């Protein structure tokens, strides 16, 4: 009788052996070596935090700059059509909602005209109270322009709701000239940066910096947006580094631009103090002058230094590239002993515990581990071969004295035989899907609701006759691969390729309650991918593959058909026939995607359709309406602004 040992005991013993082996390796390390490793790990970690945070801050600037670059090219901006232009206001509101780090967006012109849209709640309740903004207002719109026939500029102020309806408005003579503000002055200088130095905003005494993008075409001016320092302070505060670690922004003038404790410092200032940013030595108790100087003089961005309080600190510095002439820098700093003190104490306890067990457990664990390693390695190799369908007829079975491993070896051997047999009848890719769903590989099928897609390439025969056959196969395979990837990504199964055509099924073999919508989305995505493939073909001098699609949903017989020598998983019935007939009708109606009324009714609220015709296909008892699938439905989120 063959002896077998419980698998749970062997796994437990192996786990203990690994833990103790690690503990013994650490015991061998000297104290000095352990300290060097700790310091190196701290420097690496702080450097990664600095890199990540700098990328986040830089990414904020880049995202805003990208939005401004797009905004300055809009016709209303170039022409100066800022008065009574609700679509333009809706665009500004959409950009503010997309970039929550922005407090506002505005455009200033060289003739003194100006438009600004403020997100009221982003500046805090004090600003809303100061402006006496209505409670229902989400935005404040300011338009300064010179109306026709009026000698002076006029300022119109609107308070807008979330759907851009006017809830209050006022008009008076303009008292604001954008050309006098820091963000406008010098902006057209070739050396001017995209981000200004921090300054005091006129509204509510808030401090921040402006991201700007000049434009010279049309009316000429500057598109800009404000980022409040309070928002950056909150972001930096979320980057926690123990109890004393800190992340902050500063500039080359030694001023702190953003700091987790900035708001506390400003509140503690006397009311008559100058409205300027604090210096590094005012807000940060640890003097970083020496490591900062080392970095600025070309040294490493990571610095370890001793502070006056006797503690060792690790710091990392980064430049915010997008800030340009504003010279914004980022610093990350944390005390070495605080950050790693718990790790050191825990490590010592772990080593003592490991040393206590290692001498008694090592021989037994070594023996059990050897048996486990051989058996598990053999099983892993065998399962990898099955996954790749590399199955040998004479492959033996993995055996082990461990009961559970021996049982697993028998199961793997059985699985290998089943998969090898099944793959003789059904394509391997479909075998994987059928195995996942647990369907048995036997002839027969069942009725179920499915969505069927047929595609075809317009003029493919003419292309194939004129081109090199090898190139036709290569390029068509690229085309099939691109569409197949999209179909499978949307839950579909590619049933077969027939020449240049594809037949795909949804809701079989895997159930999909929303298969009609997924099929529609897949077809639209296939059309987009087809365009990308054609662009690549055009660059290579290959004719484009213009694809036509036919889509229908309904009941069909789904299952495995064929003979004992060859099986195929497919769908049969009137639903399949109608889908196949819809595809060539695209040629008659000049469309790309035709769907049946059954598809349109199932997803009419989620996609856009156009009624094309009513047809009566041969073999069908009643007429059928067919539709062109145009795209996904877009539900508007904001209405046009009404004048009050």
Image: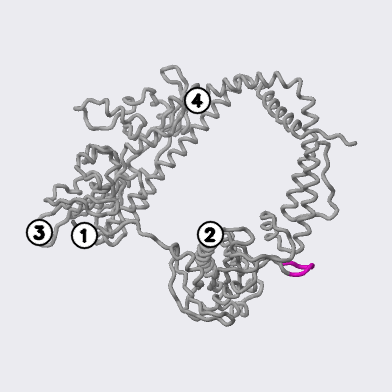
Q: Residue at x 83, y 35 (%)?
A: 4
Cα–Cα span, label 2 and label 1: 44 Å
Report if residue 566 lies within the magenta region. yes
Where disc 3 sits, the SS reads loop
- The residue segment tinted magenta is 562-567
Seen from the viewer's position, the closer of residues 590 and 108 is: 590
The answer to whether 590 is drawn above or below residue 300 in the figure is below
What label sits on residue 4 in the rendered view?
Answer: none
Q: In the picture provided, is 181 more to the left or to the right than 253? A: left
Q: Please give the residue where the numbered disc 3 appears in the rendered image.
A: 150
Q: Please give the residue where the numbered disc 2 appears in the rendered image.
A: 514
- Which image quadrant: the C terminus? bottom left
Q: Residue at x 30, y 40 (%)?
A: 228
Q: Please give the residue where the numbered disc 1 appears in the rendered image.
A: 84
Q: In the picture provided, is 124 more to the left or to the right than 553? A: left
Cα–Cα span, label 3 and label 4: 67 Å
Contact? badges 4 and 1 (CB < 8 Å): no
Instruction: Farthest residue to the right: give it.
Output: 1
Report if residue 404 lies within the magenta region. no
The answer to whether 462 is drawn above or below residue 440 in the figure is below
The answer to whether 95 is drawn above or below residue 614 in the figure is above
């Amino acid at each position: 009788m063959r002896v077998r040992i419980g698998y749970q005991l062997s796994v437990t013993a192996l786990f203990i052996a690994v833990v103790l082996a690690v503990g013994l390796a650490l015991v061998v390390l000297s104290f000095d070596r352990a300290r060097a490793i700790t310091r190196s790990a701290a420097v690496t970690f702080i450097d990664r935090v600095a890199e990540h945070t700098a990328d986040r801050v830089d990414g904020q600037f880049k995202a805003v700059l990208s939005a401004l670059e797009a905004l300055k090219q809009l016709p209303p901006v170039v022409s100066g059509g800022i008065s009574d232009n609700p679509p333009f206001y809706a665009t500004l509101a959409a950009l503010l909602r997309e970039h929550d780090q922005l407090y506002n967006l505005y455009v200033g012109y060289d003739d003194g005209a100006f438009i600004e849209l403020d997100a009221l709640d982003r500046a805090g309740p004090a600003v809303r109270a100061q402006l006496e903004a209505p409670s229902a207002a989400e935005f404040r719109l300011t338009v300064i322009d010179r109306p026709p026939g009026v000698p002076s500029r006029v300022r119109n102020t609107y308070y807008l709701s979330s759907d851009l309806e006017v809830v209050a408005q006022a008009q008076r003579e303009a008292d604001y000239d954008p050309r006098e503000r820091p963000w406008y002055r010098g902006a057209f200088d070739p050396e001017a940066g995209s981000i200004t130095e921090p300054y005091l905003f006129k509204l509510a005494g808030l401090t921040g910096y402006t991201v700007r993008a000049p434009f010279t075409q049309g009316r000429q001016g500057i598109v800009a947006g404000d980022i409040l320092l309070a928002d950056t302070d909150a972001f930096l505060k979320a980057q926690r580094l123990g109890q004393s670690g800190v992340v902050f922004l500063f500039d080359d003038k030694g001023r702190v631009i953003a700091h987790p404790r900035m708001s506390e410092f400003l509140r503690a200032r006397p009311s008559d103090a100058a409205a300027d940013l604090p210096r590094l030595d005012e807000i940060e108790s640890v003097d970083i002058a020496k490591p900062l100087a080392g970095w600025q003089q070309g040294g490493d961005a990571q610095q370890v230094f001793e502070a006056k309080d006797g503690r060792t600190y690790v710091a990392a510095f980064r430049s915010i590239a997008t800030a340009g002439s504003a010279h914004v820098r980022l610093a990350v700093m944390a005390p070495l002993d605080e950050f790693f003190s718990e790790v050191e104490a825990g490590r010592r306890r772990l080593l003592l515990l490991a040393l206590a067990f290692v001498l008694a457990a090592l021989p037994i664990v070594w023996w059990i581990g050897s048996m486990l390693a051989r058996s598990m390695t053999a099983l892993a190799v065998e399962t990898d071969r099955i996954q790749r369908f590399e199955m040998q007829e004479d492959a033996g079975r993995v055996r082990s004295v461990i009961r559970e491993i021996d049982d697993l070896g028998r199961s793997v051997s059985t699985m290998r035989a089943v998969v090898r047999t099944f793959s003789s009848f059904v394509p391997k890719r479909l075998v994987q899907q059928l195995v996942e769903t647990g369907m048995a590989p036997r002839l027969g099928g069942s009725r179920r609701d499915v969505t069927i897609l047929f595609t075809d390439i317009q003029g493919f025969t003419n292309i194939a006759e004129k081109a090199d056959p090898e190139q036709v196969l290569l390029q068509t395979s690229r085309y099939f691969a691109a569409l197949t990837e999209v179909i499978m990504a949307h839950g579909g199964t590619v049933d077969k390729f027939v020449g240049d055509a594809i037949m795909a099924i949804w809701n079989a073999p895997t159930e999909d309650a929303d298969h009609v919508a997924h099929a529609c989305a897949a077809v639209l995505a296939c059309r987009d991918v087809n365009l990308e493939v054609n662009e690549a073909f055009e660059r290579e001098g290959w004719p484009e593959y213009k694809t036509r699609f036919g889509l229908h949903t309904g009941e069909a017989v789904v299952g495995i058909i064929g003979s004992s020598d060859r099986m195929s998983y497919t769908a049969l019935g009137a639903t399949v026939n109608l889908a196949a007939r819809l595809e060539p009708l695209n040629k008659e109606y000049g469309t790309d995607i035709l769907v049946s009324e059954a598809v349109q009714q199932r997803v009419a609220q989620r996609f856009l359709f156009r009624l094309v015709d009513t047809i009566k296909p041969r073999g069908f008892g009643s007429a059928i309406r067919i539709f062109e699938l145009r795209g996904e439905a877009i539900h508007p989120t904001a209405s046009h602004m009404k004048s009050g």
